[in-house]
Image: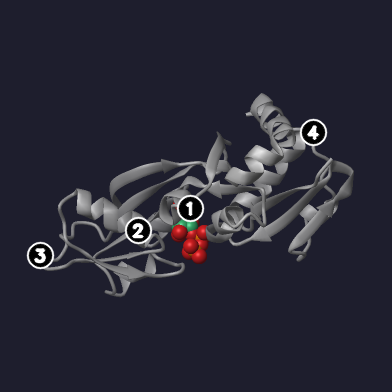
Amino acid sequence: MTELTIAMPKGRIFEEAVSLLRQAGYKLPPEFDDSRKLIIEVPEEKLRFILAKPMDVPTYVEHGVADLGIAGKDVMLEEERDVYELLDLKISECYLAVAGLPNTKMSDVAPKIATKYPNVASSYFREQGEQVEIIKLNGSIELAPLIGLADRIVDIVSTGRTLKENGLVEYERIVNITSRLIVNPVSYRMKDTRIEELVTRLNSII
Ligand code: PRP
């Protein structure tokens, strides 16, 4: 049996993804709960896991160094990689929204939008017929309107706490997000029985 390599997103989604795989019957060692390792081998399951930054998961899968990956729909929309989406895992539910300071209008000329998702934000405002200037940030996006860097942000809202605690409000909801199981197209053809087994086992518990 060939080994499957799965790219896992470090951070928020990680725990839920590990728990889902365990519920599906995969015996994942305690290293998954507390370790700094970036590659975890699970020879008993013929699985190897690589732990990547969430935004990079589709890159590893597209290049075929990982057969499969778990990635948020937000990342899939932003990265537009050549991979197949096999399953909606229905974990890490959240949404992408436009937010900003309450009762403020956007500047008439090229309003500034701060975001970690420049592609999603550009296409959203293009569809709305609005010309905007996108400012790419890597985190703490909510800071941007507070200190005058941007008129609005496009960011993930999960519990809504970050917006609330920083005195920001949501203006529009762009799209609902959940995590997806993604696959490299070549791996899908070559190792299909093992991948089918994983999909069946995950499907039975989603
Ligand atoms: C994400 C997102 C928001 C926050 C939303 O940031 O960018 O800032 O979570 O969650 P909430 O609605 O439950 O408050 P994350 O914590 O991943 O860190 P980041 O600021 O580095 O992007």
Q: Which of 23 and 100 is in front in this view?
A: 23
Badge 4 vs badge 2, beta-carbon distance below 8 Å: no
Local packing at callout 1 (Cα closer than 10 Å; few below 14, some 14-19, many 20+) is: some
Amino acid beneath label 2? Asn
Front-lying residue, 59 or 193: 193
Tag 4: Cα neighbours inside 10 Å, few (<14), some, or many (≥20)?
Answer: few
In 3D space, how far apart are the residues under numbered discs 4 and 1 (Cα atoms)?
A: 29 Å
Q: Mark 2 Cα within 10 Å, few/some/many (few <14, many 20+)?
A: some
Q: Position of residue 139 (x, y in %)?
A: 46, 67
Q: Rate crowding at label 3 as few (under 14), some (14 to 19) or many (20 or more) other CA atoms within 10 Å.
A: few
Between discs 2 and 3, the one toward the N terminus? 3
Residue type, label 1: Arg
Query: Is disc 1 in contact with disc 3, using a CB cutoff of under 8 Å?
Result: no
Depicted 93 relative to depicted 156: above or below: above
Residue plotted at (67% across, 57% down): 65
On the image, numbered disc 1 is attached to which residue? 81
Percent across and percent down for residue 87 are 57, 34
Based on the displayed image, in which of its 4 quarters is residue 17 positioned? top right
Give SS at disc 2.
Answer: helix
The answer to which of marks 1 and 2 sits earlier in the sequence is: 1
One can see residue 93 in this view: yes
Mark 1 or 3: the one toward you: 1
Q: Which of marks 4 and 3 is in front?
A: 4
| Kind of residue sitting beneath label 3 | Asp
Closer to the eye: label 4 or 2: 2
Q: What residue type is labelled 4?
A: Gly
Return the residue at label 2.
119
Residue under numbered circle 4: 25
Q: Which of marks 4 and 1 is in front?
A: 1
Residue tagged 3: 108
Of pointers 4 and 3, the one earlier in the residue sequence: 4
Horizontal side of 163 relative to 51 (left or right) equals left
